[in-house]
Image: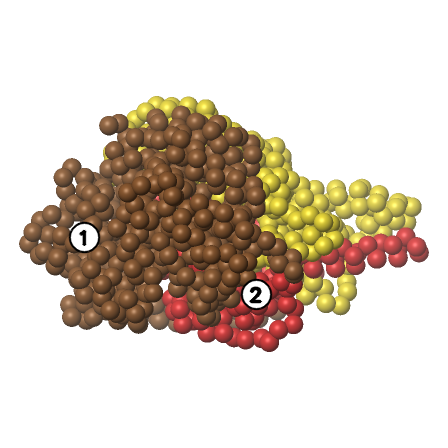
Amino acid sequence: MREKSRNIFSALAKVVTVGALVVSMATIGNAQELTIIGHKVHERVSTGKAGGDFAGEWAAAKNTKINWLTFNVQAVHERLFREASLGSTTIDVGFAANRYYKPQFPEMFQALDDYLASAPIKDFDELPKGMLGALTYGGKLYGIPFRHATAALHVNTAILKEKGVAVPKTFEELLSAARKLTFTRSNGTKVHGLLLDYRSPAILTDFARAMNNGDFLTPDFELKANSPDMIGAVEEVVKLFKEGVLPEAFLNFKTEDVITYMQQERAAMAISPFGRYRNFNDAKKSKAAGKIISIAVPKSEKLEGFNVAPIRTEFWAMLIPKNSDNKDLAWDYIRNSVSPENTIRAAVNGNGPIRPSAYADQRVKDLVPYASDEQAALSVARPPLPGFTNSARVEDIFIEEVESALLGLKTTREALDSVQARSLPLLPSK
Amino acid sequence: MFDDRKWLSLFLISPVNTLLILLIAGPSIYIVWLSLHQSTFGADSVFIGFDNYVRLFSDSIFWRATFNTFIVVNVIVYAELALALMLALALNTNFWGKGLVFSILIAPYAVSQVSAVVMWRYLLEPDIGMFNLLLQNFVGAQLNWIRNPVHGLSLISILSIWIHLPFTLIILYSAISTVPLDLKDAARVEGASEWQVFRKVTMRFIAPAVLVAMMFRYIFATRLFAEVWLLNEGGPARLTEVLGTYLFRAAFRYHDFGAAAATGLAMQLLALLVASFYLYKLYKRMQSDG
Amino acid sequence: MDDRNLLSAGRWLILTIGVLWSAFPIFMVVSSSFKPPLDIFAVPPKFIFEPTIENYILLFQEWPEFVKALGNSLIITAGATVLTAVTSLLAGYAYSRFHSRLLTLSAFFMILVRMLPPIVVTIPLFPAISALRLSDTHAILILLYAAFFVSLATWILKTFIDQIPRELEEAAEVEGASVWQRLFKVVLPLSIHGTIAACVFVVIFSWNEYVFALIFTSNTARTAPLVLSEIAGSVEGVQWGVLFAAATVQLFPILIFVLVVQKFIVTGLTAGAVKG
């Protein structure tokens, strides 16, 4: 028995040695490296098959090896900010989403104005001003937008047909359709009329926007948590939840769950970014494949001055950590990724293109049947709320209070009054 | 005058203690410093005295998290103890396939927390999870862990017990198998019932192992985090928040490192309080050994 | 005799329930990893289905980094295990054979320091480790995992070595063996079972650990649980089949390991091998 144990140890030692060799061989690469941190989806749209691997082409031309570090959304930001606060970092390009932007950016990231002046981005003026504004601190620009996710209404046409419901043209029709589309199938499974991504202020502001162009927090940090618009919006969501139109699991919903529900035909409609169209219609994974259409979220009959709801748009930008040793190369990568041509190629790979002109391109039109709807939505959409130091705390307070209202522990008004009172001290001073 | 044995013994324990001091004890001193500062990314730390503690102790969610942690930890530790004791007693005989049965019983310990949460969510998914469908058919109600915080905390406890029961089982089973058979037989000859044999002989023999198992489980269980975070993030309405998730929010969502450090120290205090009883007994034993 | 039958029936009932409780969730995930994606959430659940390896193919196509991550996990687990075994054996020997106030205090310190939640330690460690350029190396995870398990391993080995008769060492001492020779020639060979038992915990922990790996690795030393959680948290919708396949692949080696070493665990923890 003892002999056997020794053999285990010697075998283990061999495994370690061989393993270490394999790894050390794998790390011997090119002299020049560029490390990019982001979500898997950024890697996919930059290196995808349909539109081509423009990141790889760039790397080959520059004799550079790109290291993609991908994490889930929260971990991307946590890691990027942590690395950017160190004395030095190996991260050269980082992706960050708008709700994580904060006034500490000038301490952590490189101002890009000088780079932009010496090596300009082609047709830079086309990039949406609102997004650039969110990336500007003290008059300097700290990031270049790459991807947007604008909310759409996704509709399972087969379920609508089954129930004899027409595709909604106004927000009022959307709400009544959602109620009609909530039912139980003969095998006992429930179908829910409408899904929402999450319980955060960003998501529920959609209702306030569609009904009356309302806001939770304005870009100049005016908090309107208990404004009539927000109370009306949250009250409607609470009603939908209590009626079972929104599933019970909405209390624990994440984006993934919306996809699972739609793919399993357990829901008839969802308000979720346009890009989900692919997931819902994915023949391999979805029972609903070929049945889902994605349209701009309709606005309320009462809302004047808009064709569709001025819904949320969220976006990702590329930033360069201040402590990176590779800033010139990083800028060249960014510049290349957002060129008009590569914006189109990324869109064909499934990216939400930042440049409006991309929607006019035939390649995008062919692959993306919702291009004109997305363009219409994007033309009126705006970020749900600005980023600031305590934005995550305010988001958590809102979620907590809204969940209290959903559970019936508080009235909507009580909950939102409490959000207002608890969040005000956390806002940046004007 | 130092003798060689003393130097030798210090030398022998130095690698272990170097690891502990460099990687755990040293950083924890910094944690104390950090808890007195306001610190986040891209900003210099500012000394703020006990403000972090004041904010912590005036936050009702912190107290709820402390309460939840206290309840869940006690449920977990005692349930594990009772279940592990039953299984260990049942295992304490020779039968064909015993090795396999033991392996299966300790298998959950090998499952990563991510996978464990995935497994249990799959079985308890509302409306379509197999266990919930079974419950619906036989009991007429589902385990509504999404909506009902008591159900939520119950599922968290079940998950945690599922993952950690093997640890307690291993220690108790090892201890039980050292109970000398002749002692038990002698008790039986004297007319003791099986229950009396268990109480008077087995229990007395394995008491030290029970002590150690409980102490380690108390310490580990207080950190309860992944089960909650991956399952429901402490929701709904933060009613199932535990100290582990509270700390994680402060450190990794709000990037408020001072508050995170203060929470960490509070957590250690709680672990110390519940474990101190066991530690004290252990300390006594080590001294009497020496 | 009725009493005995009742006891035996109770024993089997308890063991059956225990086995079902432990095995069923694992069985469900492993079997579902061979289901076609559309059958995974079928209502009512499908127990009979045509097995497919589609999920495994997708896993290795879409997540090629998973293979490398498994390799990293292996290296780190092996490294942490060896480090824990060596250092704990030395310390366990010292705590068993020598006695002084200082040793008792340091034993107490070992347990006390172990109470700090690991997650807190990451905050001060991160800048220090980055400054030392140890970020994203196998070494840092090996050191960390060992640090968090030497307390338990030392305690197990101390108890184990307590059971090794001192006479054996004394005999060697008479023959002129130094303390090192006694340790390596007499104690070590007799402590193999105890060492394995002490190491089982660090092996399993290192193979599955998530928080340290998330914070201290990015690419070179990225471990399997990280990729697993990325698959579980994909914003493109969880591919349950792929996730189950990945969980199965990640679980398999460690399950085999537990199966192989299970008999050493108990003998190691009870020191039964020496007592014979």
Q: Residue type at mark 1?
A: Leu
Residue A96 in view of the camera: no
The residue at 35%/27% (across/down) is A424
The residue at 52%/43% (across/down) is A240
Looking at the rendered structure, the secondary structure element under dot 2 is: loop
Which quarter of the figure has residue A59?
Answer: bottom left
Q: Position of residue A376 (x, y in %)?
A: 29, 54
Dot 1: within a 10 Å radius of its alpha carbon, few (fewer than 14), some, or many (20 or more) residues?
A: some
Looking at the rendered structure, the secondary structure element under dot 1 is: loop
Nearest-to-viewer mark from 1 and 2:
1
From the viewer's perspective, is A327 left or right of A388?
left
The residue nearer to you, when weighing C179 against A82, is A82
In the picture, the quarter occupied by the C terminus of chain B is top right
Q: Residue type at mark 2?
A: Ile
The residue at 88%/45% (across/down) is B192
Q: Which mark is residue A127?
A: 1
Of the chain colours in the picture, the one used for chain B is yellow
Q: Position of residue C37 (x, y in %)?
A: 52, 68
Instruction: Give the red chain's letter.
Output: C
Residue lying farthest right?
Answer: C1
Q: Is A171 situated above or below B53? A: below
Report which residue position mark 2 lands on: C40
Residue B122 in view of the camera: yes
Q: Is B150 situated above or below C148? A: above
Of the chain colours in the picture, the one used for chain A is brown
